[in-house]
Structures are given as structure tokens and as C-alpha cells.
Image (cartoon, rainbow, N blue to C red):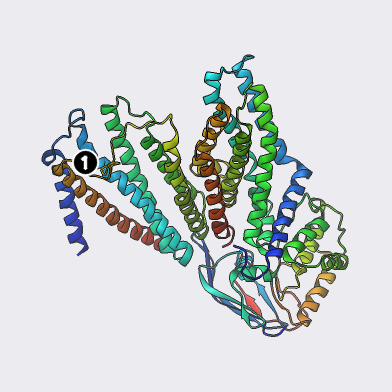
Amino acid sequence: MKNLLAALLWLWMCLVLVGAFFYAPAAAGFIGYSSRILFFHVPLAWTAFVAFLVAAVWSGLYLVRGRPGDDRAAAAAVELGFVYCLLATLTGAMWARTMWGAFWNWDPRQFSIVLVLLFYGAYLALRGAVDDRQLRARLAAVYALLGVVVTPFFFWVVPRMKRFFSLHPDSVVNTRGTIDMESHMLQVLLASWVGFNALFFWLHDLHRRAAALHEAEEA
Amino acid sequence: MPGTSLRFTGLRRRFGRLAVLEGVSGAVAEGEALLVTGPNGSGKSTLLRCLAGLLAPDAGTVELTEEGRLLDPAGRRRSVGYVAPDLAFYEELTAGENLAFFSRLRGAPPARGQDLLARLGLPAERQAGALSSGMRQRLRWVWALLHRPRLLLLDEPFQNLDAGGEAAARALLAEHLAAGGLAVVANPSPLELGRAAPNLALG
Amino acid sequence: MPPPTSRSADWLAEAGAVFVKEWRCELRTRYALNTLALFAFTTLVVASAGLGPLGASAAVGTPVLPVLLWLILLFAAAAGLPRSFVQEEETHTATALRLAATPSALFCGKLAYGATLMVALEALVAPLFLAMMQLDVAAPGLFVATLLGGGYGLAAANTLIAAMIAQARGRSTLFAVLAFPVTLPLLLLVVELTRNAVAGEPSGGALTQLLLYDATVTVASLMLFPVVWNP
């Protein structure tokens, strides 16, 4: 059953790949084919955010129930979220080079993704700095929850900084609350979003089971 | 002290790959002292830290009941009297100031600290950083008894004490047990604790 | 959290005892005060001398100098605040504290110490900074409010993180790594508020945001501290 689902996921991602390059048209107002990267960039960024929330939920569960498996699940979500976030940053920078002429220009979106990267990095550094398994789990869970409480301030505070104006295109749902996108593109984008999320949860399951086996072997 | 008892069952604690405690059980009743012996590294201190609530065991339970009420780990931490080599005090403060600070935290009357200081022959105005190792051990005893605990956890309780110090500490322990208190005493070699004590050998 | 029983007087006495103990130990060694003041003063002299006898022009100074002021305060805080918990673990006094203190009272005592230390530092550094940089503040009330709110926020965020790194390896580097993402929103806010105060512009809702940040971090730290502190 799991193998079948994994095969389906593989097929789905292949279709997304084909759809991104051949099915969806290039968007108007973008240089060349640069708009096609959005089918990967946007779902990666959203899934990185989902991973963040998943990690926070497992961290909270660990503090309530104290099961080692909860801690492994939180750590696995952060490790995957870090990779997703890194890929979102890289794809964003590549696109920025084409559209804005520079890989990096401290757009508020770039600012916030760097903050999230730093936060994930700090979480992993904290885990690496504690030897005792119980203490590591407790401190990591506290830091993940602290991050969830504090980072919203960042997204609330940055828009008021007048020096930071954004060139970033509207989110898929724009400020007027309407979806402003050609329908073929929207189909591919949503399919990709579903695919990347499924990929995350599949990898997350694998990753935490591998961590459990690794710990059992050590003991 | 009616209804005070300590039971621990199946305690297990690892540090990385090293299994320090592997299924350790025991029980102590009123007026009883449990002697824990074993060579260095056999887990005596780890067991006492688990009993005190300073370390959470990977498996197993610790049940300290006082006046018929089962204490949670936070309650246990605040209730036990703990003497161990890893216990230290603020070196910038005098012995008396250290005790005054902890008396305020524990809600103990200041007279109790002064009384214990006198019994163990400790100079209250000496800076804790300037105390000899024997004097530090006496200060640990005073600190542990400030709040009149029902359960004393003693890790090598007589180390560094001279004959007078050991006699004073033993007298305090005997009074504690005579009043129905409980004690768990860890030592590398067997100790004569005054009355037939159950014995737990580790490692 | 304070215990549900009617022991709030005991709880206050405990927090007060911790606060008094911290300051008594500090005043005997002067370690944190000396480190913080010397660090702040050295960086201030370097920055001021670097700008030369004329200082920065108003056009450059208004946007840049507030950043400089908060960088000095941030790094001074990072040099002095973690010590309150690191010291407890390093000298093994943490064991006695764990067994004797109520976690929330302990945290509040430590936080009160950190916040007063920050305010003392600001009282020393801010006037000196304004004088040496020849910076005029158009709205002194807003300036003082920002210093108080920002100093408290730094103390609140750093106290919990200090309790965490005190139990880990590589403490000093780890502190900076963990504290930066948590304090970044605060730093952006206080820099903006200080600019507003210098230029005499209205600050909009930024002061409210600062107060909300302080309150959020305080409540979150109070709830999370017992888990950090006890097994």
C-alpha cells in the first residue's frame, strides 16, 4: 500500500514537471520563461512553512506527553523544512537574478526567508550542542515553540519599515482577495503544491522511522 | 510522620550508549535507612539524582508518599533533603547569607539555620568560597536539613569530615531516623548506620 | 506558573530573594557591570572617534546612529545577561536552586535582575552616546520609552535563552545563534522607534507593537521556563 502511494507520488511529480514546462504558458510581464520557476518556488516556500508548523505541533506534543517519538518527529520536520527553505531561497534568488538583475537585494520576502533559515539553523545547532537525549528533546521543543510565538512579530513589523519596499509579485491570492492567474498555470501550481506537500509528509515519515531505528540500534 | 514511604521500581537511565541504571528497585519505610553500595561508576549518584527529581529516568517510577499524599516530581524536588558532592553554594556570599537565601526560598525560619550551623560548628560569617572541603560538607548538611525533610538522600555523606564533623552528622541522621524520617545513603563502602538497614548493591 | 494555592506572598518573597541575591553577588564582584560598561564604552569611543570631531551630519546621522546605539546595547547585553544562568550551572549552584526554588519565582527574580541591569546600562550609555555623537533627540519621552521597552525586551528574551544554553556545550557562540532570530523583530522595532524619536516623527503603532512583543515574550518564557529548568 505504501509502495503504491510512493509510486503514485512519483508519477504525480513527473506530471507536475512536464506540466510546468509544457502545459502551462509563460506568464506575461516576466522575462523569458522565468515565470516557470514559480511552480517550484512557491510550493517549496509554502511547504517550508507547513514544516515549521508541523515541527511546532510535535514539539508541543513532546512537552505534553514526553514521548521520544514526538521529539524525533519534530526534529525530522525541521531538517526537511530546512532543505525546503534552502531550495525556496535558491530558486527565489535565481528568479531575482533574471527579473531584478541581482541575486540578492533584501526584498522583505528575502528578509523573512533568511530569518526562517536562521531559525531552523539555530534549532539544529541547539540539538547538536546537547548530548543527553532527554535534555536535547526538551530544549529543542522549547526553542521551536518560542520561534512560533515570536516570528509572527517579524512579519507584522517588517511591512512598516518604509525603507523596505517590495518588488515581489503578488501572492497567488492577491491583496484584493481574488485569484489573478491564468487557469492552466493555476492548475499546475496547485498540483505542484499538493505534490510537494505529499513529498514532505512521505519523507517525514521515512525520516522519523529511520531515526527511531538508528536510536534503537544505538541502545 | 504518618504515611511517609518511598518506593522506586524498574529505574532505567542511559547516558548516550552507556546504561548507568538498568532496572533498579527498592523501598524505604519510616525510620529506615536504605544503604546503597557499589564501586565508582555503578550508578549510585545517578540513582539518588533520579530519586531527588534532578534527573528523569528513561523508564521506571519513583513514588514518594508524604502524609498519605503521592508527590509529583516538582513536589518531590522541594521536599527531599539532599547531600551530595555536586551540591555547591554561592562563593561570593558568606555561609550565613547562603543559608538565609535558601531559608527564604524554602520558607524556613532563620533560627533553624542558625541552630544547625551551631550544631555542626560552622562559622556563619565566613565566605563560602573560603571554606575548606570539610566545612563545605558541613554546609551541605545544614542546607539539606533546613526545611525538616522527611526523606534524606545522602551521597557519600561523611566524605571530608573530621571525627567531630562525622559525629555531629551521624547524630543528626540518627535523630532524623528516630523521628520516623527516611534516608537513602549511597557510599562506595558499607557504612554502619546504627540499626539494621536494608542494603542495595549496585554494579 | 505560580502555584494554585494561596501562596502568592511566598511566591513574591521567593522572587524577591532571588533578585536580591543576584544583585548582592553582582555588587560583590562587579563582573557584569564592569564588563558591560567597559564593552559599551569601548565601542562608543571607537564609533565616535571613527566619525571624527564633526560627528555625522543630520542627513546621515538620523538613519544610521540609532542602529549604532542598539548594536552597542545588543552586544553589551549578550556579553552580560547569559552569565546569570551560566554561572549557576558552572559553579554547580544550580542543583541547590533546582531543589529549593519555585521555577516561575526563580525566573521572575532573574528577569527582574536582567531588566534592571539593562536599564542601568542604558542610563550610562544613552546620555554618553547622545553627547559624543552630537545627536539631538526631538522627542525625549519616546526615546526614554523605547529604551525602557527595548531593554526589558532584550532582558526577557535573553533570560530564557540563557537558561537553555547554560545546559549545552559551546555556550557563548550558541547564545548568539539562538538569540538572534528571537530578538530580531525587537531590534527592528526599537531602531525604527529611536529614529522616530530623533526625528520627532509620529511613531504610529510601533510602541504598541513593542509592548506586545515584551508581553508575549514574558508570558511565553514564564510558561516554557519550568521545562527548560527541570527534568
User: Is any part of residue A174 visible from this angle?
Assistant: yes
Residue C149 locus on image (x, y percent) = 60, 42
- Amino acid type of disc 1? Asp
In the depicted view, which residue is nearer to us: A213 or A67?
A67
Quadrant where the C terminus of chain A lies? bottom left
Q: Position of residue C113 (x, y in %)?
A: 68, 48
Tell me if I can see residue C180 in this picture. Answer: no
Q: Identify the residue at image location x=18%, y=44%.
A: A186
B97 to B201, vertically: above or below: above
Residue A177 placement, left or right of C34: left
Q: Residues within 10 Å of mark 1 (few under 14, many from 20)?
A: few
Give the image quarter of residue B25.
Answer: bottom right
Whole-percent x, y for residue B86 in the image: 68, 59
Residue B41 drawn at (x, y percent): 61, 64
Along the viewing direction, whichever of A210 and B22 lies nearer the viewer: A210
Residue B57 sits in quarter = bottom right
Q: Residue at x 64, y 71 (%)?
A: C5
Q: Is residue A84 left or right of residue C48?
A: left
Which is nearer the eye, B173 or C10? C10
Q: Which residue is mark 1?
A: A180
Chain hosting mark 1 = A
Indicate left or right for C30 with A151 as reference.
right
Above or below residue C190? Residue B100 is: below
Element assignment for label 1:
loop
| Quarter residue B40 falls in | bottom right
Quadrant of the frame with the N terminus of chain A: bottom left
Q: Is residue C63 above or below residue B142?
A: above
